[in-house]
Amino acid sequence: MAEEKQSKHLHHIDPYSPQFGTMVPMGAQKFLRTCVLWQLVRFLVINFRMTVLILKSHH
């Protein structure tokens, strides 16, 4: 019963509308999420930081 009430309440809200409550990526954010070169750089940085953390924990 509660599920029906909730779905009826949210039925009138369209996805990506201001009432929906989600942020839609624009410009630079969309570029950074789709740029393979940036993803590679982030991957290397995160792996380097994890390696340093693991090496510190072993000493």
Image (cartoon, rainbow, N blue to C red):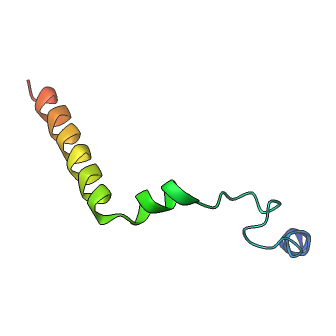
**Which residue is painted at 35% across and 63% down in the image?**
35
Relative height, residue 51 to residue 40 (above, below): above
Task: Name the one closer to the observer, 31 or 55.
Answer: 31
57 left or right, relative to 29: left
Q: Residue at x 50, y 55 (%)?
A: 29
* Viewer-side residue, 38 vs 49: 38
On screen, residue 54 versus residue 7, left or right, reads: left
Q: Nearer the viewer, residue 33 or 47?
A: 33
The quarter of the displayed image where residue 24 is located: bottom right
Where residue 4 appears, x then y in whole percent? Answer: 88, 76
* Residue occupying the far left of the picture: 59
Total count of labels? 0
Taking 26 as reference, is 1 above or below it? Answer: below
In percent of the image, x 74 and y 72: which residue is there?
A: 15
Q: Give the percent coordinates (x, y) of residue 13.
A: 84, 70
The C terminus lies in quadrant: top left
